Image: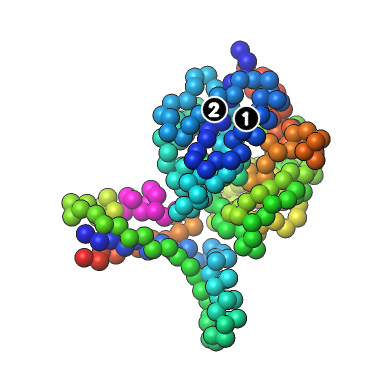
Amino acid sequence: MKVRVHVSLKNGVLDPQGRAIHHALEGMGFAGIEDVRAGRLIELDVADSVTDEALDDMCRKLLANQVIENYRIEKVA
Amino acid sequence: MGFAAAVITFPGSNCDRDMAVAIEAITGGTVHRVWHGDAVLPERLDFIALPGGFSYGDYLRSGAMAARSPIMQAVVAEAARGVAVLGVCNGFQVLTEAGLLPGALLRNAGQRFVCRDVALTVGTSQSLFTSGWFKDQRITVPVAHHDGNYYADAATLDRLEGEDRVAFRYAEPVNGSQRNIAGVLNEAGNVLGMMPHPERMIEPAQGGSDGRVLFESVLRGLRVAA
C-alpha cells in the first residue's frame, strides 16, 4: 500500500522557506502570488496489514512535530 | 564522590569534544562519552549534556531523529529523576523534539546560518544553571545555527515567563525567536536547552569566559544539594 503523508506548517508559524520561494517567484516576474507555504511530502510503501492507527502513530511520534506542523495521511493505492 | 557527567554523541554531533573538555576543565569531574546507540547511561550521573552539531544531517527536522535514538529513553528517565540535563544548540533541538522542553526551533527568520558572538541577557538567576549570574546581566556567548528561531504558542510563552523559565534572551536581533528567547528551562528546573554555546566561551583565549559561569553554577548547585 502506498501512503503519502503531507506535512505542513500550522497557520501562524513563520515559514522563511516559503517566504524565500515567494520572493524568488516574484523576482522571476510571476504576479498575483498572495502567499507561499512550503511543506514536506513523505511517501511510504507499507504492508496492507498496517493499520490506520499505526500510520497515525507514525505521524504523531516522528513524521510531524505537532507543536508546529499539521499532517494529512493520503492512501494512494 | 566526584562530579560525574555524560556527554552524548549522535552521528553528526560536532561539539561533543568541546563540551567534554569544558565540563572536565571547570568541574574537575569525570566525563563519560556515550554513544547514541547505547541503551544505558553510566550510573550515578550528576549531569548529562547533549552537544551541538547536525545529528543525522538535520534530516526530517533538526534533532528529530536523535530524539528517537535508544539513549534518549535513558536521558528522559534520568531527567525525570532530577538529574541535570543541558542541551546546547542541536542538543536544545533534541530536547524539544524529545518532549523534555516545550516549543520548537524553526529556521532562522533571516534564513541565514548565524555564526557569531551575541549579547544575551540572563533571564533568571533562580536556576541551577544560572545562579552565578544576576538577573538581566548582559553576557556574550557565541551562536552557530540555522534553526534557532524559538517558537511556542502564546499560552506556552506566557507560562514560561510566568514561571520564570526563560533562562536567556537575545539582547540583539539574531534569529527571530519569539520574545527573544535563547534558552528555556523545564518545569522542574533541571533541564535547560539553549542555542548559544557556553562551552565555547570558557577561557580568555576563546575571546571570553562568560560560559564558565553556567558550569560553575551547576557544580556549586549540586554540591549544595548533596
Contact (Cβ within 8 Å) of mark 2 with mark 1:
yes
Q: Nearer the viewer, residue A69 or A77?
A: A77
User: Relative to residue A8, is residue A55 depicted above or below?
Assistant: above
Q: Tell me what residue is drawn at x 18 percent, y 55 percent.
A: A48
Amino acid type for the residue under numbered disc 1: Ala
To which quarter of the image does residue A2 belong?
bottom left
> Residue beneath label 1, please?
B20
Residue A60 locus on image (x, y percent): 37, 51
User: Relative to residue B218, is residue A3 depicted above or below?
Assistant: below
Q: Tell me what residue is drawn at x 21 percent, y 65 percent.
A: A77
Quarter of the picture containing the C terminus of chain B is top right
Task: Report crowding for label 2: few under 14, some 14 to 19, many 20 or more residues within 10 A (C-alpha).
Answer: some
Q: What is the C-alpha distance between the residues marked 2 and 1?
A: 8 Å
Q: Chain of mark 1?
A: B
Residue B182 horizontal side relative to residue B7, left or right: right
Span highlighted in magenta in the image: A56-65
Task: Tell me the element at label 1.
Answer: helix
Amino acid type for the residue under numbered disc 2: Arg
- Is residue A64 in the magenta section? yes
Q: How many marks?
A: 2
To which quarter of the image does residue B68 belong?
top left
In the rendered image, residues at marks 2 and 1 fall on the same chain: yes
> Residue beneath label 2, please?
B33
Task: Tell me the element at label 2.
Answer: strand
User: Relative to residue B49, is residue B166 depicted above or below?
Assistant: below
Q: Is residue B210 visible?
A: no
Q: Is residue A46 visible?
A: yes
Q: Tell me what residue is drawn at x 46 percent, y 52 percent.
A: B59
Quarter of the picture containing the N terminus of chain B is top right
Residue B54 locus on image (x, y percent): 54, 46
- Which mark sits nearer the N-terminus, 2 or 1? 1
- Name of the residue lying farthest toward the left: A49
